[in-house]
């Protein structure tokens, strides 16, 4: 069993920044890929960004150039730095761990609201 705890969400004005954190209960090397997803009201959950155990990153087109995913191995934490936020970025953001045997674990999510 893997526990994931997200933090860092909140209310921010358009053009602002937030950094989300996802703390894992196991070493990040026990995890194949860590991903950030988001789900807006009435929409399906979508991938935002991911990072593999080898450090390879991937971004959804809507966030390329604005979001950066990173990790701290010692802290067992993955981050997503979100800059130039837009109202369309408003969603609940979830962290997901895909294990080497392809089982998935999800965090409970953190709300991000971009509004003036």
Image (spheres, rainbow, N blue to C red):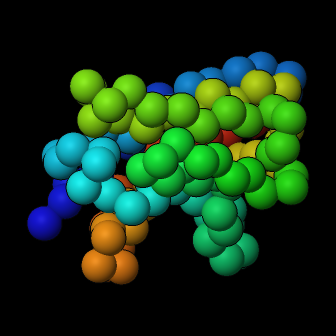
The picture quadrant where one finds residue 75 is top left
Q: Position of residue 77 (x, y in %)?
A: 35, 34
In this rendering, the answer to whether 96 lies above or below 14 is below
* Residue drawn at point x = 86 percent, y = 55 percent: 61
Residue at image position (39%, 67%) is 98
Quadrant where the image shows the C terminus: top right
- Give the residue at x 67% y 39%: 113
Q: Position of residue 74 (x, y in %)?
A: 25, 25
Q: Give the quadrant of residue 7.
A: top left
Question: How many numbered marks appear?
Answer: 0
Is residue 45 visible in the rendered image? The answer is yes
In the image, farthest residue toward the left: 1
Outermost residue, front side? 54
- Tell me, yes or no, if residue 9 can be seen here: no
**For the point 49% across and 53% down, which residue is it?**
52
Question: Looking at the rendering, in which quadrant would you find the N terminus?
Answer: bottom left
Image x and y of residue 56, in percent = 59, 48
x and y, in percent, of residue 22 in the image: 38, 40
Classify residue 32 as left or right of residue 25.
right
Whether 63 is drawn above or below 30: the answer is: above
């Amino acid at each position: 069993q893997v526990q994931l705890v997200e933090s860092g969400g909140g209310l921010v004005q358009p053009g602002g920044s937030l950094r989300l954190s996802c703390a894992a209960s196991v070493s990040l090397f026990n995890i194949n890929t860590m991903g950030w997803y988001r789900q807006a009201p009435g929409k399906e959950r979508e991938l935002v960004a991911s990072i593999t155990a080898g450090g390879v990153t991937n971004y959804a087109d809507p966030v390329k150039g604005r979001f950066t995913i990173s990790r701290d191995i010692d802290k067992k934490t993955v981050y997503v730095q979100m800059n130039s936020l837009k109202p369309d970025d408003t969603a609940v953001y979830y962290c997901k761990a895909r294990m080497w045997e392809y089982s998935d674990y999800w965090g409970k999510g953190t709300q991000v609201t971009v509004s003036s």
